[in-house]
Image: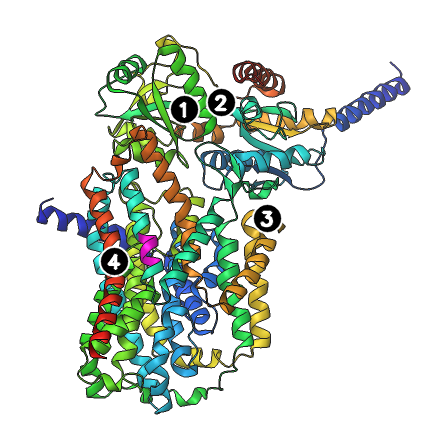
Amino acid sequence: MEPASFFSELSSNLAVGLATALTLENLAYCALGVTLGTFLGALPGIGVLIAMSMLFPVTFHLPATAAIIMLGGIYYGTAYGGSISSILLNVPGTPANAVACLDGHPMAQQGRAGVALSMTAVSSFIGASVGIIIMMFFAPVIAEHALDFGPAEYFMLILLGLLAASTVSGGSPLKGVAMVFFGIALGLVGTDLNSGQLRYVFGIVELRDGLGLLGIAMGVFGVTEIVATIRGARPEPVDSRSITLKTMMPTRDDVARLWMPSLRGAGIGSFIGALPGTGSMIASFMSYAVERRVSREPERFGKGALEGVIAPEAANNAADQTAFIPTLTLGIPGSPALALILGILLIHGVNPGPTMLSERPDMFWGLVMSFWVGNILLLILNIPLIGVWVRVLSIPYRLLYPSILFFVCIGAFSVNNAVFDLWTVAGFAVLGYCMRLLGLPAAPLILGYVLGPMMEVQFRRTLIFSGGDFTAFVDRPISLTLLFVSIAVVAAPALLHLRGRLRRRATT
Amino acid sequence: MTFRAMLFAAAVTMAATLSGASRADWQPSGPITIIVPFGAGGSTDIFGRVFATEMQKQTGWTVLVENRPGAGGLIGQIAVANAKPDGQTLGLSSTSMFAVEPFMPDASGELQPDSVDFMGTLSVIPYAIVAGSKAPFDDLKGLAEYSKAKGPAKFSSTSAQLTLAMEQLAKEIGIKFVAAQTSGSGESLQLVAGRHADFTISGGVHVPFVLDGRMKVLAHFMDERGSYAANAKTVDEQGAVLPLRNYFLFNAPKGLPADVKATLAKAIDNAVNSDAVRKYGESIFVTARNLGPEGSTKDVMEQAAVWKARLGK
């Protein structure tokens, strides 16, 4: 495409998007979404999945665009809110904010909580902005070529996502891979798409469509997180009066430290987020590691280095935005939260994928522009109105958590009006808690569950169309390239590990 | 006529009117729920909601649509079959649920053609066999020749019933194909648009793609030609027998009292023939048409007999 026509098309798309995002209704749902997101994100143990699933039933009654704008707002809003409890309580509001504890809480102990909070909000905004800009430019390009993605390409892309999810996450790769396989096994339950055969249904009618993403996600993430937080240590009470606009004013030195780490974080986050299977948590961990490596004073990290808070927060917000690229252009959700968003779109009869940008430009660009609106609102919510959220942290858990569990149950029930779904949540909550005690990560399980059946379908479709010829997977350039990237993803950590061992052996 | 006789005549007339009214004017004691066994936002759901709004307006009853998706519509339809026959639960799905599904090789047997009473139809489902506009064939005969020359054509199928229907048609015309199942018409159309698959059968989602020239209709998979592609011929016009005639089909639990059934059938007929429903039908290129309880039962049973014989069960 000519650059000139690309930009004129972009500007007309942005106009359409802005018109959609700024209708009173969509603006209101965006504001509601980001406010709820900040609120629920700030509460320890309430991650993005539980926040979204609580609002799930409400979205059935909204127009599709408003529903996605609101859920999107909750989704990226929790990343802002989550850093508040990381900094003040040393308890991550969401897993993606865990890194912010490392330097954020020491800053709070040094009396610099206000600066940490305000700089985090600004860097989150920078990260999100970079992510949105990348989405604006790259999503149309990917969508244009997305029809070239046939079954073989989809299979390779999903394979890459699953490998990345299980090996890059920082924990034990073996445990990650094991959980991916467990997730794939859970995904087998239900009706086989190709033959119509029932698998592992045991005569239970409700299982014919599988276990249901919402039940599993709410169980292993939501309820488990809440139970674990209740059981965990009581955080020290926060004096809400200590956070004032005055204490939030950064020094000149703070501002000087803001830009480069934020932009580096945003870059890393945008890249990681756009890959399927990785998420904002991995983005924040990687960004922290990079920041410590490039720093001239790595010894400051862990003792209240501002860069150690703002870079990962920029990264996770950027990743949250770019994660929409594979979801909306290819229909492949990059993370469990986006799998829920995908589910909502499907319920509303919108088919995310190559045709979405051309079929529903109002929705796609409306969503993109609502991200801008939402992030500006978040900046307001998180700097002038920060006191509200600090006070939220002092709500007693004995009131808060039962009411959240109550909403979770309503949410789980109302999707299909089926009691069976409540039992699914309960069963997976028990499983999730056991996994937590054993140190097994839940995110690869969810991704295995979501992507496994997709992978199987694409695998078999490739072979059906090729007449059983396996070279169909490697005789097209895109799929061959993706295969090489997958091999690199697996081989790189192993090689690094081996090099480290050799080096250690050489020194001893 | 004496005054007394006049009074008597008036009383008799009034009594007759009253009793007549009480027989025809059954009233539901609560809301009427139409169970749509597919997801919200799908074609059945949207059409069903247009219909429900109109029925509510005409009768004054509260008419709700409830989505009970799962197992390709089986879960919701079983719920209708097991509901209390008090006239307050109706189902809206498609002919193939009752005429094909029960005879599929791995059917559970929980749903049979006679598990429910049929109450009428909303319209025919506007199926068409479509291919990308650059495909080197324009009709079924062309597709058959292509599949003989180039190896089996790639069929991206949206349901197992449609794969069976396509097999039936292919036998008659001599099309060789391999079928890969997709999750719905959206995905099928993408595979066809990206030329990863050669053709699909779509129930209406394809219309905008045909109108803007990205796809073409090889055959209208119903009795008449859809006006959005009036040049393409129907399956019958191309010398084959239409293997499946799918309607949006109203049904109710068995054992409705006769007066309840009559009142509901009348209410359904009035709503289907309303301007609002007709206008919505035109927007998706179908003609609203109610076969009524007898007509739709006859149609389902005839098609069921054919499919039972075909599938040998």
- Mark 4 sits on what residue? A491
Q: Position of residue A299 (x, y in %)?
A: 25, 86
Query: Which residue is labeled 2 in the image?
Result: B246
Left or right: where A462 falls relative to A74: left
Q: Which label's residue is closer to the chain start, 2 or 1?
A: 1
Q: Earlier in the sequence, mark 3 or mark 4?
A: 3
**Residue kind at label 1, given as amino acid type:** Tyr
Numbered label attached to residue A206: none
Residue A87 place in picture, x, y as percent? 38, 81
Q: CA distance from mark 4 to mark 1?
A: 49 Å
Look at 37% across and 20% down and name the residue there: B226
Task: Name the residue that disc number 1 marks.
Answer: B127
Which of B278 and A140 lies nearest the eye of the viewer? A140
Which quadrant holds the C terminus of chain B?
A: top right
Is there a contact, CB below 8 Å, between mark 3 and mark 1?
no
**From mark 2 to mark 4, how far is it between C-alphas?**
53 Å
Q: Which residue is mark 3?
A: A417
Q: Position of residue B292 (x, y in %)?
A: 59, 20
Residue B75 is situated, as x and y percent measured from the top left of the image, at 58, 37
Labels 4, 1: front one: 4
> Looking at the picture, which amino acid does disc 2 mark?
Asn
Real-space Cα separation, disc 3 to disc 1, in angstroms:
31 Å
Q: CA distance from mark 2 to mark 3?
A: 28 Å
Neighbours of disc 3 within 10 Å: few (<14), some (14-19), many (20+): some
